[in-house]
Amino acid sequence: MSVALDPTRVGVLRRRIRWIVAFTIAYNVVEGVIALIAGGAASSAALIGFGLDSAVEVLSAAAVAWQFASPDPESREKTALRVIAFSFFALAGYVTVDAALSLFGVREAQPSPIGIALAVASLIVMPVVSWLERRAGRELGSASAVADSKQTLICAYLSAALLAGLVLNALLGWAWADSIAALVIAGFAVREGLEAWRGDACTVPVAALTGDIDLEHDEH
């Protein structure tokens, strides 16, 4: 059942989401710069792709920051959701192309200790950030905040794929391993993009958009 929040709690949740989004943007800017520099030094398509993914993360987080900068965030919900959906689709497209180039031997990545350390750090940080934003977004009833938390979680999945690929490449010379994982993540990104796109047209509780409750048993 949907429960109305008092204005004080709403204010707390909105500020919390703004702080989470600000941290996400700052972290991804630093992460992206390191990944691009390390990727260029190692000729690693996976690291370069990871760095570009950070730019997509910043775009998604900025969309939510823009929404919650308004005195009436709900009025910007539709636009924020569309931006997040497009960012998912762009991420999926890039990862697919990048993975195909690696699989066909167009690029050959070298071992990167810096890249491995970056992947480990992101694999630890991103799930925590995603959980915090998703929890606040669900309580507030913000579909865009929940969608952005999913985008952040995809960064964690990409971190795991990147880590596996870099480690296997460094130890066994298996440059194709992260490409296979990246294709799986690309499919997941498309699914999440479609969910974010559909979310703006619904006048149902955010829990229904995320599958936490049965739509038939909640009010529209």
Image (cartoon, helix red, strand yellow):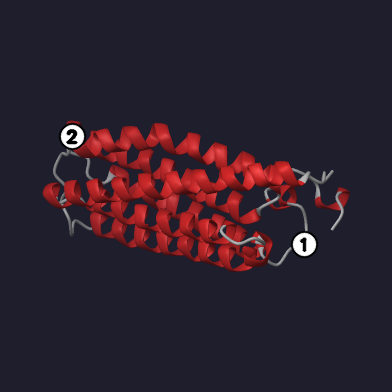
- The residue drawn where x is 13% and y is 44% is 110
In this rendering, position of residue 182 left or right of residue 35: right
Callout 2 environment at 10 Å: few (<14), some (14 to 19), or many (20+)?
some
Residue wearing tag 2: 113
In x, y percent, where is residue 206? 71, 51
In this rendering, position of residue 5 left or right of residue 122: right
Q: CA distance from mark 1 to mark 2?
A: 48 Å
Element under label 2?
helix
In x, y percent, where is residue 68? 58, 56
**Circle nearer the N terminus (1, 2):** 2
- The residue drawn where x is 47% and y is 58% is 62
Residue wearing tag 1: 203
In this view of the protein, which residue sits in the foreground, 58 or 45? 58
In this rendering, position of residue 40 left or right of residue 94: left
In this view of the protein, which residue sits in the foreground, 191 or 179? 191
Quarter-of-image position of residue 212: top right
